[in-house]
Amino acid sequence: MGPRSKILTFVFTLMGFVAAPVSAPAAFLPPEVLAAALPNFGPANMGEPEFRQILTEIQRAYAPIVSSHGGRLSITGDWNSNTLNAGARQIFGNWQVQITGGLARVPELTPDGFALILCHELGHHLGGFAWAPPDSPISGVWAATEGQSDYFATHVCTRKIWGNDSAKNAEARTVSSTEVITACDAVWTRVEEQNLCYRVLNAVQSMTLTMSKLMNKPAPAFSTPDPAVVNDTLTAHPAVQCRMDTSLQGAICPALFNEGLIPGKNASGGAFGVEAEREASNNSCTVYSKYSVGLRPACWYKARLTSPSVSSIFPAGTKAKINVTQLKNANGHVLVSVFDGPTGFPDNPNQAVWIGRVRARSGQTSLTTPELPEGEYAISTIHDENDNQKLDTGAFGIPTEGFGFSNNPAIRTGPPSFSEAKIRLSGPRTDVQINLKHF
């Protein structure tokens, strides 16, 4: 195995989850884990067919995204292995996730909890800042920390793989605890969003209960957050309660994550710099990005960009209520990008001062920005019916999904300029109506 080989092993042992960078699959588990006694398992919650089906579904969902970042995704599982193990690695363009049947057969782990662990491993590849340090100068930075991978799993991955599974999500409403329902309903108002949140948090309970059982620790609870406060962002595995807290915050974060970006990976100043954190903040819920919910917990994350920076960039001003009309159906989401200048307008959300999304509704839907300075802005929006976070096009680049712009300019041979779409935001709130175009 070449020097670029690196592996993060998500190991279930009596000592908990262990991450071990190694140089070859033969050393996938450290000797002390291999020597540990395995728990006495009860009945499993899944068989090999469901195990394979989950692997296939997540591979299908994420292979195109990994390809867009220059990698080749391979999610593999060894059903016959009795080890308790999952891991991620990158080697020569291959972005790998590996998991074992021994882990799938832990009785506390549901199929959704199992899928959540796969999402965690994908988070090492795609979650971005905050980063785990490289194991050598040669291997380079590629893996998100354990905490960031947990956050990505519930903020991004589970929403992607389960977002359109309305029937299964609705089942979660009937089996969710008061704790789960209270946490989700405090943020999400639409039934579909609540149901998805319930399902995600039920999976979190399964995953963290599995951790606590194997570590012989008390089960965590959403109502008892970890009080720890770190001085520096933790790159090792956080405590189980902290991981539950992180997963909860990811599940209730309404910020849009741009799947065309691995936040912070190519930021000026390097992957560990302030610009990397800024880029990550614009794709998640942070104080810097003007959110008060969905924040990464202080038990593992130490933010450098805090409220004073926000105030200097987004002083108190006006909000925009954006009403999007002429939606043909309720599939997917409506994505909105707000720009304060021509740079990046209309199709580069990384240059936007604010991005948001809302579940589509037939006819019309709306969302409201945080406070922005009074001034001139242009807004672009698309009806992302298939939730691939881009405007799909057909022959000759003609859009096959609805799109629109503030000021509702005429569409001729291409998108409008910033000047053609600009509007002025002022006062406590500005109402903006965008009528989608369809070809």
Image (cartoon, grey):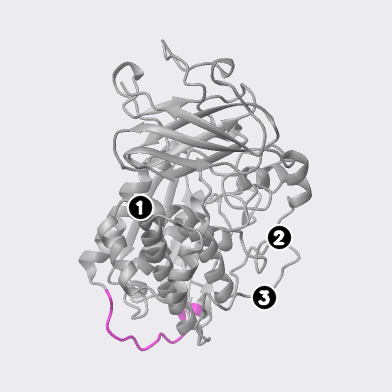
Q: Residue at the location (32% across, 62% down)?
A: 77
The alpha-carbon separation of the residues under discs 3 and 1 comes to: 32 Å
Q: Nearer the viewer, residue 127 or 194?
A: 194
What percent of the width, then of the height, locates residue 52?
25, 61
Mark identifier at residue 163: 1
Mark identifier at residue 227: 3
What percent of the width, then of the height, locates residue 200?
41, 64
- Residue that mark 2 sits on: 302
Name the mark nearer the viewer: 3 or 2.
Answer: 3
Query: As displayed, is residue 149 above or below residue 221?
Result: above
Name the N-terminal-most of marks 2 and 1: 1
Name the mark nearer the viewer: 2 or 1.
Answer: 1
Circle 2 packing at 10 Å, graded few (<14), some (14-19), many (20+), is some
Q: Nearer the viewer, residue 357 or 406?
A: 406
Q: Amino acid at mark 2?
A: Lys
Q: Secondary structure at mark 3?
A: loop
Q: Amino acid at mark 3?
A: Pro
Name the N-terminal-most of marks 3 and 1: 1
The stretch drawn in magenta includes residue 41: yes
Q: Residue at the location (40% across, 74% down)?
A: 206
Q: Amino acid at mark 1?
A: Gly
Residue range (magenta): 33-45
Q: Residue at the location (47% across, 17% down)?
A: 409
Q: Main secondary structure of the magenta part?
A: loop
In the image: residue 277, left or right of residue 217? right
